Image (tube, helix red, strand yellow):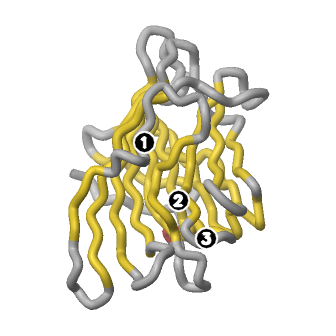
């Protein structure tokens, strides 16, 4: 495997990276920055150029305590949203004392053919030092043959009572053979107070 080299010194400012042998090239496409935003829409860059897209969530901070980070897809460039989606979610968590650990299926946060924005996290804390970070992998969004599979992996500090670190995994699919060419992120309550979402394409 080759050594990855960034095109500048700071990972957070990288606009391109080297390649993993056998895994293709990771190409920076865009950065979207929240500032008390009701939603963050990414309406360009999702094309047939790449088979996979990776979205990197950097310190997503909610304005309202215990808001859940949500996703929804579009097939018309963001003119409308509401592609039927099915997901499953589970999480692992432990509090700051190292006790009260749990691994569980979140059946209240999965969806079945939902056309509304759906959660890709449980509730995030809104204290000044609390946030969510993680990844979304979207596979071949321009396919005209298959549904559009995605996976998310996030970590957050929860928004209720004793602070917990919560690692959440979501898998699902947009149930359409039309191209997914835009996505939108929002909170289940309040705004996205701050944070960035970087989008990369995988050749």
* Callout 2 touching callout 1 (CB < 8 Å): no
Q: Residues within 10 Å of mark 1 (few under 14, many from 20)?
A: some
Question: How far apart are the alpha carbons under marks 3 and 2?
Answer: 10 Å
On the question of residue 26 being in view, the answer is no
Label ID, residue 174? none
- Identify the residue at horizontal 43%, vertical 47% (top origin): 109
Q: Residue furthest top?
A: 145
Image depth: mark 3 or mark 1 in front: 3
The one of 93 and 40 positioned closer to us in this rendering:
93
Indicate the quadrant where residue 23 lies. Answer: top left
The residue that label 3 is drawn on is: 61
Q: CA distance from mark 3 to mark 1?
A: 21 Å
Dot 2, crowdedness within 10 Å: few (<14), some or many (≥20)?
many
**What residue occupies the far bottom of the structure in this picture?**
97
Residue 201 point in image, percent of width and height: 50, 40
Q: Which residue matches tag 2?
A: 57
Q: Mark yes or no: residue 75 visible.
A: yes
Side (left or right) of 185 relative to 94: right
In the image, residue 115 sits, relative to residue 155, either above or below, namely above
Describe the element under mark 1 as helix, strand or loop: strand
Instruction: Provide residue 153's location: percent of width, then percent of height.
Output: 37, 54
As drawn, 108 above or below 92 = above
Residue corresponding to mark 1 = 137
Q: Indicate the secondary structure of the residue bearing disc 3.
A: strand
Q: Quadrant of residue 48?
A: top right
Q: Position of residue 86 (x, y in %)?
A: 43, 30
Q: Is residue 54 above or below residue 100?
A: above
The residue depicted at 49 percent of the width and 64 percent of the height is: 123
Residue 149 appears in which quarter of the rendering? top left
- Classify 10 Å Cα crowding around label 3: few (below 14), some (14-19), many (20 and above): many
Q: Residue at x 48, y 38 (%)?
A: 53
**Mark 3 or mark 1: which comes first in sequence?**
3
């Amino acid at each position: 495997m080759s050594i990855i080299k960034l095109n500048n010194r700071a990972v957070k400012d990288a606009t391109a990276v080297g390649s993993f042998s056998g895994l293709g090239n990771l190409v920076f496409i865009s950065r979207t920055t929240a500032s008390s935003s009701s939603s963050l829409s990414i309406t360009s860059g999702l094309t047939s150029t790449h088979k996979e897209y990776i979205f990197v969530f950097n310190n997503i901070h909610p304005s309202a305590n215990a808001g859940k980070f949500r996703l929804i897809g579009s097939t018309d460039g963001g003119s409308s949203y509401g592609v039927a989606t099915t997901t499953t979610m589970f999480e692992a968590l432990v509090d700051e004392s190292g006790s009260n650990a749990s691994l569980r299926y979140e059946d209240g946060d999965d969806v079945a053919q939902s056309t509304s924005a759906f959660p890709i996290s449980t509730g995030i804390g809104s204290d000044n030092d609390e946030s969510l970070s993680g990844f979304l992998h979207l596979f071949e969004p321009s396919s005209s043959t298959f549904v559009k599979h995605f996976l998310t992996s996030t970590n957050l500090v929860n928004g209720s009572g004793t602070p917990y670190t919560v690692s959440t995994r979501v898998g699902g699919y947009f149930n359409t053979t039309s191209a997914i060419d835009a996505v939108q992120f929002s909170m289940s309550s309040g705004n996205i107070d701050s944070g960035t979402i970087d989008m990369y394409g995988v050749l």
